[in-house]
Image (cartoon, rainbow, N blue to C red):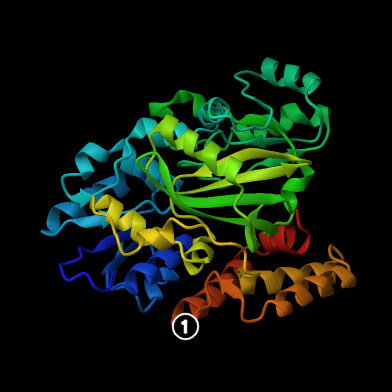
Amino acid sequence: MSKRQHHLPPVLLTKPGYHGTLAATRSLGRSSIPVVTAGPSRWAISSRSKYTSHHVNCPNTIETEPFMAWLTEFGRKHSEKHVLLPTCDDTAWLYARYREQLVEHFHLGPNDITVIHGLLHKGQLAEHAREAGLEVPRTWYPRSQRDVLEIAQQAVFPVLVKPITQVLFAAGSKGVRVNEREALPAAYAEYASFGHGHTICDYDPSISHPMVQEFFPAASNGIYNISSYAQDGKLWGARAGRKILQRPRRLGIGICFEEAPVEEHLTEGLERLIQRVGYSGVFEAEFVRVGERSVLIDFNPRFYNQMAFDIARGLPLAALAYFGALRQAPPELAPEAKSAREPSDRVFTYSSAFKVMIASQRLSGELSGKEADGWLAWYDAHEGRRVDAVNDPDDHWPARMDVMQMLQRHLRYPGDFVRTIVLNH
């Protein structure tokens, strides 16, 4: 990309506190693409990166009307169109839902709302995945308390109660584990009270009902993920990894990943899935290992938490998404992007969160001394082969901001820190 002589339009990235946004900011900025970050605070990690050209304040995406009004006005007042790339479920859905009004002011990917909604609505995703030959979990979609009572009699416990989509879901919870059938009605009713933003409820009222899904114990340390870029029904390369540690450890966001071989039968299934739906863009698909089975549990059609890991392994996802929105192919990147590398013992870590969690759970007894020492030994053994979510020797300020914000968050919400980090609940 450095050889390109023509002008490169700026890119606008929201959710500057997300690790995927930071990975994209650094990747695009290093390729001399101007990066503008937008969020409620100018102190977010991506906004403090030296590769950010400019930061602008904007409403949170959960405030749909103010956010869309701000975004439209931003596009209208800039004579040069910015490239608009989805950094989270909210923006992936909103950019597709309001694509017709945004395309006048921004460069956008080709996906319309039926494509994105079909991937972010877990019920629709499951239907598409089955038709593509991929295995999915056993899931129930209750519409009444009577349905919940019937499910309680059918299901094998424990189960998960989960939102049918994370789009405009203010609670942000990935789900709750229910261990006993007697507890399911109350747990379901409580979870259903969280609710989604009215914009997506107006579009699809079914999302107001959570789903109930079989629980896989292996999900705590047996998630296999495939990341790639889809274009014209084909995958431009793929990278694979295993999520070996998450926060909280039972059900949470990954903080440690190891490289893994790319399994061809799964990439073939994912190609059939994106062909069926008609999706183009960056994605990450998550599978849980159950014996010899690989069960698809999520498909993220946007930037994601550990994207820096895949960029470091030769898959320039942010650049591919950028040029895809411009309807331009980056030919100098294509040969590398299309080849899936064999694992080379690299790992991905969110080091600051990893160290806090290991130390806290050792003190609380959630981790034995032997377990904690094992994790620290694993971390030290990969010195020089770790890709970090935030730390980068070339770009110091995001890591400094991350530590300060983590400390501030734990001091402000001590109960949440004790429950999720110290006690692993």
**Residue 199 visible to the viewer:** no
Q: Is residue 168 visible?
A: yes
Q: What residue is at 67 percent from the left and 35 percent from the top?
A: 161
Q: Nearer the viewer, residue 44 or 368?
A: 368
Instruction: Find residue 134 and report its image quarter.
Output: top right
Which amino acid type corresponds to the residue marked 1 in the rendered image? Answer: His
Q: How many marks?
A: 1
- The image quadrant that residue 334 belongs to is bottom left
Q: Is residue 288 above or below residue 117?
A: below
Determine the image quadrant of residue 384: bottom right
Give left or right: position of 177 versus 335: right
Q: In the image shown, does 127 or 337 lie closer to the viewer?
A: 337
Tell me residue 300's x, y (percent). Answer: 50, 45
Q: Is residue 225 left or right of residue 400?
A: right
Label 1 secondary element: loop
Q: Position of residue 412 (x, y in %)?
A: 60, 66
Residue 130 appears left or right of 314 = right
Indicate the position of residue 359 as horizontal and vertical percent values: 77, 74
Q: Quadrant of the N terminus?
A: bottom left
Callout 1: few (<14), some (14-19), or many (20+) C-alpha neighbours within 10 Å?
some
Q: Residue at label 1? A: 396
Who's the residue at 85% across and 68% down the image? 371
Q: Position of residue 341 (x, y in %)?
A: 54, 61
* Whether residue 279 is situated above or below residue 375 in the rendered picture: above
Q: Residue at x 66, y 56 (%)?
A: 242
